[in-house]
Image (cartoon, rainbow, N blue to C red):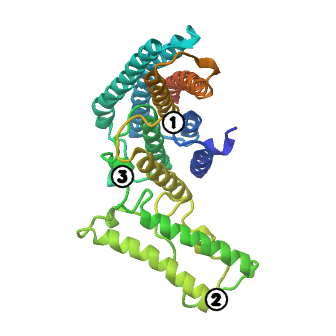
Amino acid sequence: MMDPSSSNSVNGFYTFLTRGIDDLERVFLSNNFMSIQFLQRALSLLRSCHTQLTLLVQKLHLPVGEKWLDEYMDESSKLWEVCHVLKSAITSMENYHSAGFNLTSSLDTHHYLTPHLCRQVIRAISGCCREAVGLGEENRALMETRIEPLSLCFDEKVSVESKLNGFNGFRGVLYAMRNVSSLLLMILLCGLVYCSWPESNFLRGGYEGCLFFGSGLMISTARLHQRVAAEIGRISGGRPGILETRIEPLSLCFDEKVSVESKLNGFNGFRGVLYAMRNVSSLLLMILLCGLVYCSWPESNFLRGGFEGCLFFGSGLMISTARLHQRVAAEIGRISGGQPGILLYEFRRSKTAVEELRGELERRSSQGVVVEWEKEVGMRERVETLKGSFGILRSGAENIVGQLDDFFDEIVEGRKKLLDFCSHR
């Protein structure tokens, strides 16, 4: 159930996104990589984010006819386009499903496994494998022609025109939504359509080198901050004290403000370097002060979590999103071995089951004997595994198509609701 507070305030929305990403990470860790269940949860989170965004917009008292509506319409159009690609790829699996079920039906109609039947089923297996290869080629073309032009990636640019506090914080909300949805969409595309590892800049670490959404520098700094703050709270027992005269006036804290005058690419990137140095040194100095001088826990906003609620240096949303991204990217690199393709676990498992059955048939065909295959343990297990793999794949695909159809309705309803919202104010 969604927390009502997530649609009542900007910070509530950020908290909702953070919890959603953390929950998805737990599903990632407890299920097979790119499983139907994991991808269904990713799609469910994407739908929930969109729903909460449209509800929040109605609470922010946004001006009628301003650019915020165009920005929302652009984002929802991107969701619409990518989800249609997802649906197209999933429905294209039908021929592969059919080829897989034809394999088992050939065996079900014969009790005895003859050399001739072995050769017949092996030919059917070759046809099934061709369907899998053809599906991959079709999906690769979909990615090239319809997804690559959309440039799904983390958006680290914060320009004068898109200051994140604009429109009562709506631009910040949309910025967060854009980055989270880009991650979720790329996960879904890699699982259900095609993953061109390692060519994909997004999966290779598309935000590394920037100072905003999820860079390694941010994650490391924020993680150290959180651990130090938690331990200070544990050992201090909440006993207060104050560094009044010389330290507090210096305002050591994370600097999440990126104004027109301090664009981080200024002076050949020196402003970005200084921004990073300022934040890292603030953390290190506060650690030293707490250890050697005095710690004013819990009054210190810095130690209480001074960057929570912002979208830049080390927010919980950033850390959660970047951590999930890193884990997904690392696992893609591990299982793909640098080879592109469809990463859906149930699809990969079905291909393995087909190859195992082929190996068993070729072995028996070479022996030239007739056997009652249902009484042969190895043969029977491989056929049952094949049936189960294709059955799970088909039912899972149907469930995701149903989710996508519901999401299309929600996108249409959300766009209509905001247009009506603007026209009746």
User: Real-space Cα distance between discs 1 and 2?
Assistant: 53 Å
Q: Nearer the viewer, mark 1 or mark 2?
A: 1
- Image height of 143 relative to 285, above or below: above
Residue positioned 57% across, 46% down in the render:
28
Q: Reading the chain from its start, which is encountered first: label 1 or label 3? A: 3
Spatial separation of the CA atoms under disc 2 and disc 3: 43 Å
Res. 204 mark? 3
Give me the residue at 72% from left, 82% from top. 240
Task: Please name the amino acid that badge 1 sits on.
Answer: Tyr
The residue tagged with tag 3: helix, strand or loop?
Answer: helix
Q: Is residue 36 left or right of residue 135?
A: right
Image point (37%, 36%), residue name: 341
* Residue in the foreground of this view, choosing between 174 and 196: 196
Q: Which mark is residue 199?
A: none
Q: Work out how far the residue at label 1 is from the one at label 3, CA to CA, in angstroms.
A: 21 Å
Residue 352 vs 269, above or below: the answer is above
Packing grade of label 2 (10 A; few <14, some 14-19, many >=20) is some
Image spot of residue 250 (x, y percent): 50, 83
Describe the element under mark 2 as helix, strand or loop.
loop
**Quadrant in the rendering for residue 59:** top right
The residue to which callout 2 is attached is 294
Pointer 3 local density, CA inside 10 Å: few below 14, some 14–19, many at least 20: some
The percent position of residue 66, horizontal first and vertical second, equals 40, 38
Q: Position of residue 12 (x, y in %)?
A: 62, 49
Residue under numbered circle 1: 345
Asked if marks 1 and 3 touch (Cβ < 8 Å), the reply is: no
The amino acid type of the residue labelled 3 equals Arg
